[in-house]
Image (tube, rainbow, N blue to C red):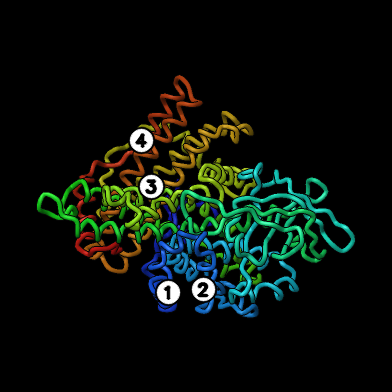
Amino acid sequence: MSTERNKNLIGGEFLIKNQDAQSTFVPEEINEEQKMFREMTRDFLEKEVNHLRAKIDKQLENPHLIPELMEKAADLGMLSAALPEEYGGMAVDFNTESVLSEELGKSQSFSVALAAHTGIGTLPILYYGTEEQKEKYLPGLGNGSIKAAYCLTEPDSGSDALAAKTKAILDGDEWVITGQKMWITNAGFADLFTVFAQVDGNKFTAFLVEQGAPGLTLGDEEVKLGIKGSSTRQVFFENVRVPKNNLLGEIGKGHKIAFNVLNIGRYKLGAMVMGGSKKSIDIAVKYANERHQFGAPISSFGAIQHKIGEMTIKTFATESATYRISGMIQEKISELVASGTEKPLAKLLAAEEYNIECAILKVLGSETLDYVVDESVQIFGGTGYSEEYPVASMYRDSRINRIFEGTNEINRMLAVGQLMKKALKGELDLMGPAMQIQEELMEIPDFGDEGDGSALYQERKSIVQAKKAILMVAGAAAKKYMMELEKQQEILINLADMVIDVFTAESTLLRTEKLIALKGEEACEYQIAMTQCFTNDAMERVYLAGKHALAAFAKDDMLVMMHMGLKRFTKYPMINIIALRKKIAEKVISENEYCF
């Protein structure tokens, strides 16, 4: 595999090419306009939302609270930021959307409601609506006078969305919709529903249904484990009649709407939960500095510092991956717009191009937040188990993110499946590098490379080598199972874990390399330490996942040879990870917040 650095990579190409650090978007490059949006959102949440957390969570007692807050957010442009100007929007770029998503992710149930409205509630119309539908609905969706919900899931069709049983029959100039939807976010106050149904029994199709249509009824509010402030209900359709022109998109093409909108949703969820991780660290560190035991703040204890250091490292890595992907999508949007594509379509196509990376971020971000909030509760100890303290609700609210926007298991298999699909289509040359690696296994390894003297040489080298490990295992598995590989879910999940760790480690490396180029090594000592810590642990996880996958299908001499290759490709020099993690923790503790 070449060590050449490349500026613009297509989706999934990170596995066979190395991105140039200078072409990577990093959060330190956020411009003044984006900072303004961030501060506006942060200020709104602080003044209008965060102090109402307890009331918001009692949704049954305060059903109008979140809709009212959404209308206040709309007054600031938070519902219309991404809409085109001709529909009353602000038409901000994708990197600005990322900044907004990160901040919104700190508001728990409110962020769920707002994101469902601006994402899956609004985007289907923006991307697939007729001009008449856009003019009718988008201005109201942007100013908050219309609130939206998205009706996809059914009792017997969750991850298998195309198995939906809700049906739509054309009767003259009207569609008649009959069926049941469940787990519908915003259902309790939505004015407009995007509803998926089968036409002629097997043509998965989307429709726009307004609240108040005869035959449309709602179930009771679900009593949920977390995100208690968001409205979640079943929606029933009993011969609901909607005008013929309320068809959204084309008959039988509803899967394109469902899946393409989910690409954006997965990315936005990753950005939001990363913001939630930062907030959780802030809360945990402040408590650790204030809480005294044995005559000292608990933040001075090594066990607590381990937690704070690791929480910070994982969040920094997730943030690096988030803005790297944001930059890739923004670059693709700009490229498509320059070639004549309308901006909404360009955004849709860009997210589709990077659907692998969006799936990676969804898994990475949701599992990082779960780790961070769990450790926050542990830092709080017994008080963390009390609803009087904010970490209890953060812990509960976090759990849904591994289920939202496709379960993490589905997203893991999607990421690997899309890589394989691109290879079969000839869009990615995975086989060429995989064959070269097979030949490299026969060579005698050279362990005498001491590096080029740069701060992150070993990390750069390790990531290049780890990509070889993935290609080796994936190539051997594909050769063994061929078209049956998609049925080997455990192996696919192992491969996905390898891919996620390598992409994240590389994102962290690229961010730190870019900062070193801007500020110098001395000014980036903490970023270097976090890159080293994450790479160290990532290489161990890549080895373990690869070992499990190989042992599942390789045998005898092949297993021995490939296991040796795996160990070689995941080799990383021994470092004092305890000292590095403590160094990071002490910085965060001294600043009393996440500070990177």
Q: Are discs 2 and 1 less than 8 Å apart at CB?
A: yes
In this picture, residue 566 sits left or right of residue 381 = right
CA gap, disc 2 to disc 1? 10 Å
Ranked by sequence position, the earlier of labels 4 and 3 is 3
CA gap, disc 3 to disc 1? 41 Å
**Which residue is depicted at the point 45% across and 26% down?**
551
Quarter of the image that includes the C terminus = bottom left
Identify the disc placed on residue 78.
2
CA gap, disc 4 to disc 3? 12 Å
What amino acid type is highlighted by mark number 2? Met
Foreground: disc 2 or disc 4: 2
Question: Which residue does the numbered mark 3 point to in the structure image?
Answer: 463
What amino acid type is highlighted by mark number 1? Phe
Foreground: disc 3 or disc 1: 1
Ranked by sequence position, the earlier of labels 3 and 1 is 1
- Count residues near mark 3 (Cα–Cα under 10 Å), then give few for <14, some for 14-19, many for 20+: many
CA gap, disc 3 to disc 2? 39 Å
Q: Quadrant of residue 413?
A: top right
Identify the disc placed on residue 59.
none
Question: Which residue does the numbered mark 1 point to in the structure image?
Answer: 44
Identify the disc placed on residue 568.
4
Ranked by sequence position, the earlier of labels 2 and 1 is 1
**Which residue is depicted at the point 55% across and 56% down?**
354
**Which residue is depicted at the point 35% across and 61% down?**
279
